Image: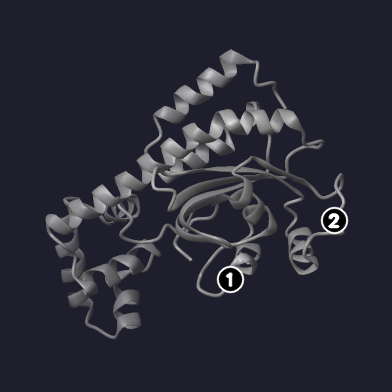
């Protein structure tokens, strides 16, 4: 891992981070730019409402992160929790977990089993609260080359406040874009349904068969959607719908929706 004393590399990273306004941009930054100073193989972050035993997620972004393992972290009531998250909630300090280099005798055996099976190997994680301390961001890096140590803690202490600010910008933009759609020309429930299938690559004939409606109705719904989104083609509609959060981007290594 590069030393935090490498001011030039760190400053460039933070400058690039300041330009980020979308979840996809944040993923690219973590997946590519950040590797020079914090090598890692998997990443997940998000914003959620804080509870004593976990976090109720509002929005999450990730790459190379196993969804099955994340489902195992989901508690009754929708909270996401793990021993590492709970330790961070209790202390507010950067957390490091190296399964090979630390004793695991005091860890929850069930969670430890899921964690080992996930292939995530180890964790360097930290977060930040908003001013109300009712919501917090959380950033977790995995598959980091061993050994983990104080250099990782110092780096997280520097990076996370800036990543927290970037995540707030992303969420603000998502909400602003959604408001713009609602206050402009709102898509109907049927238009959104058809648009979702368009985003899945279905043809008008296939959508008509799936929904049990006439092909001409599908074409009319699509044309109305193009007008409301102010685009000219289906591909433009798909791109704008994903960007504005009207539909979930189902491509791998991108975004998780609310669980």
Q: Quadrant of residue 41?
A: top right
Where is 56 relative to 253, above or below? below
Label 1 residue SS: loop
Where is 139 relative to 134, above or below? above
Q: Is residue 176 left or right of residue 18?
A: left
Neighbor class of circle 1 (other Cα within 10 Å; few <14, some 14-19, many 20+) is some
In percent of the image, x 69 and y 58: which residue is there? 83
Residue on which disc 2 sits: 104
In percent of the image, x 72 and y 52: which residue is there? 120
Q: Earlier in the sequence, mark 1 or mark 2?
A: 1
Q: Is residue 253 left or right of residue 110?
A: left
Q: Position of residue 218 (x, y in %)?
A: 22, 73
Q: Quadrant of the N terminus?
A: top right
Q: Position of residue 102 (x, y in %)?
A: 85, 47
In percent of the image, x 62 and y 51: which residue is there? 90
Distance from the alpha carbon under mark 1 to that under mark 2: 22 Å
Residue on which disc 1 sits: 75
Q: Is residue 87 left or right of residue 77?
A: right
Residue 33 visible from this viewpoint: no
């Amino acid at each position: 891992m590069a030393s935090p004393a490498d001011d030039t590399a760190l400053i460039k990273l933070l400058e690039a981070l300041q330009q980020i306004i979308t979840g996809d941009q944040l993923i690219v930054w973590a997946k590519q730019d950040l590797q020079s100073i914090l090598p890692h193989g998997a990443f997940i972050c998000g914003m959620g409402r804080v509870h004593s035993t976990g976090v109720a997620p509002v929005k999450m972004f990730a790459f190379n992160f196993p969804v099955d393992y994340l489902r195992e972290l989901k508690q009754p009531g929708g909270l996401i929790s793990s021993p590492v998250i709970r330790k961070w909630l209790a202390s507010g300090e950067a957390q490091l977990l190296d399964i090979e280099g630390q004793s695991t005798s005091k860890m929850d055996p069930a969670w430890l089993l899921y964690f080992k099976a996930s292939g995530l190997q180890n964790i360097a994680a930290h977060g930040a609260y908003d001013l109300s301390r009712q919501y917090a961001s959380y950033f977790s890096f995995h598959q980091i080359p061993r050994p983990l140590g104080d250099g990782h803690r110092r780096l997280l202490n520097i990076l996370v406040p800036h990543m927290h600010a970037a995540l707030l910008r992303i969420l603000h933009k998502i909400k602003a874009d959604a408001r713009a759609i609602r206050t402009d020309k709102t898509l109907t429930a049927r238009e959104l349904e058809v648009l979702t299938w368009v985003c899945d690559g279905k043809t008008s004939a296939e959508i008509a068969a799936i929904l049990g409606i006439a092909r001409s109705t599908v074409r009319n719904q699509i044309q109305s959607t193009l007008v409301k989104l102010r685009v000219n083609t289906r591909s433009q509609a798909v791109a704008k719908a994903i960007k504005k959060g009207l539909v979930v981007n189902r491509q791998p290594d991108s975004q998780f929706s609310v669980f």
